[in-house]
Image (cartoon, rainbow, N blue to C red):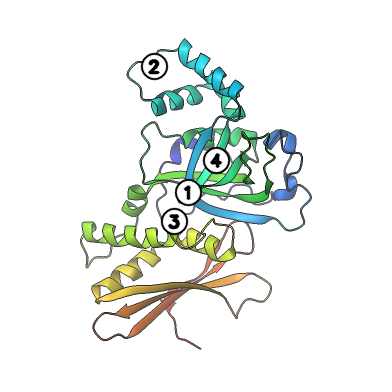
Amino acid sequence: MEQQPKETRSIPLGNPLPEGRPSETANSLTPQQSCPSCATTSAGSPSPSWIYAIGSIEPRFPSLAIEKEYAQLLGRGDMSGLTDRQALQSVLSQSQNRYLARRMCWVMTIEGLETYLLYPRDPTDLSLLVEAVRPNPAATDLDVVIGSKGPLAPPEVCNALQIPIVIFDQVYSMDRDSLVGAIPKPTNVSQEEFSLEAAELFDRIMQMADNAGATDEHRALNYLAVRYPAVYSVTSDAFARNSSLESIDVQTSVLASVRNVVEVVFSFRNRTTDVVEKFFTRVDVTDQFPFLVTKMSPYFDR
């Protein structure tokens, strides 16, 4: 499927996103194409470690030589009036400078921590990384990366930065306000109030301990955060009933036999009566692309 980078700025929840190339796995990685300096990628791994991560993508200079080459490109163009970030975005987005974009380190940070070193499985998807470089970045900018995790990067790859390599199949770029604005609003609440409630829930999911999008638990949560509007509607309804979001728990579904299915349980405690209500949904996380198994519904402890 041909990628359309210009359409990756915002993801309307509830609409199916392109599924990439589902037949490809980590075993199809060609190190010479996707990671020229990484001879020890996950090629041949019998069990790919899937990633569904939400963070920010940043370009880094892997060596002094690449940084000096970038400085020469800056000197050849008219960058008057541009900030440093705008100038970087301008240089990398020009087709004649694509060679420089290929040599850059593309680092994904999550909660401010350098977490993954990104390489496209298909070289033509380099444009998705370039599109992630905003000329005017904001703290609410978000990038969703879906791929497979390999080994730690060798020290020579990215200026001695040793973090796991991720070969990605898809990248979506957005900002939190656009994400929240795309969620269908319940009829009994104002848009401003609902936006605040949705933003709070999204932030709580993102701030869960060590959410690097690598475990089944966190892949399911991240998938729901950007793809399933009902989690926000249920939370808004609970707030309207004077309840607080007490916890979000993920557990293996007892109904799963062949497939790997998890249950995500949202617990709400009434601020007046102290009664706890629970709602849950099931997500299949067997393969690279999670998907919804059952819609949000009341949950009863067994």
Residue at the far right in the pictured view: 44
Q: Position of residue 160 (x, y in %)?
A: 63, 37
Mark 1 vs mark 2: which is more N-terminal?
A: 1
286 and 252: which one is in front?
Answer: 252
Mark 1 vs mark 3: which is more N-terminal?
A: 1
Label annotation for residue 107: 4
> Badge 3, how many Cα within 10 Å: few under 14, some, many 20+?
some
**Disc 1 to disc 3: CB gap under 8 Å:** no
Mark 2 vs mark 3: which is more N-terminal?
A: 2
6 and 278: which one is in front?
Answer: 278
Q: In the rendered image, which residue does mark 2 sit on?
A: 79
Q: In the rendered image, which residue does mark 3 sit on?
A: 226
**Disc 2 to disc 4: CB gap under 8 Å:** no
Q: Position of residue 228 (x, y in %)?
A: 43, 61
In what element is the residue under mark 3?
A: helix
Distance Cα–Cα, label 1 vs label 3: 12 Å
In what element is the residue under mark 2?
A: loop
The amino acid beneath tag 3 is Val
Against 96, residue 221 (above or below) is below
Residue found at x 74% / y 34%: 32
Distance Cα–Cα, label 1 vs label 2: 29 Å
Mark 4 vs mark 1: which is more N-terminal?
A: 1
Q: In the rendered image, which residue does mark 1 sit on?
A: 55
Residue 155 located left or right of residue 72:
right
Count of numbered marks: 4
Residue 296 located left or right of residue 262:
left
Distance Cα–Cα, label 3 vs label 4: 21 Å
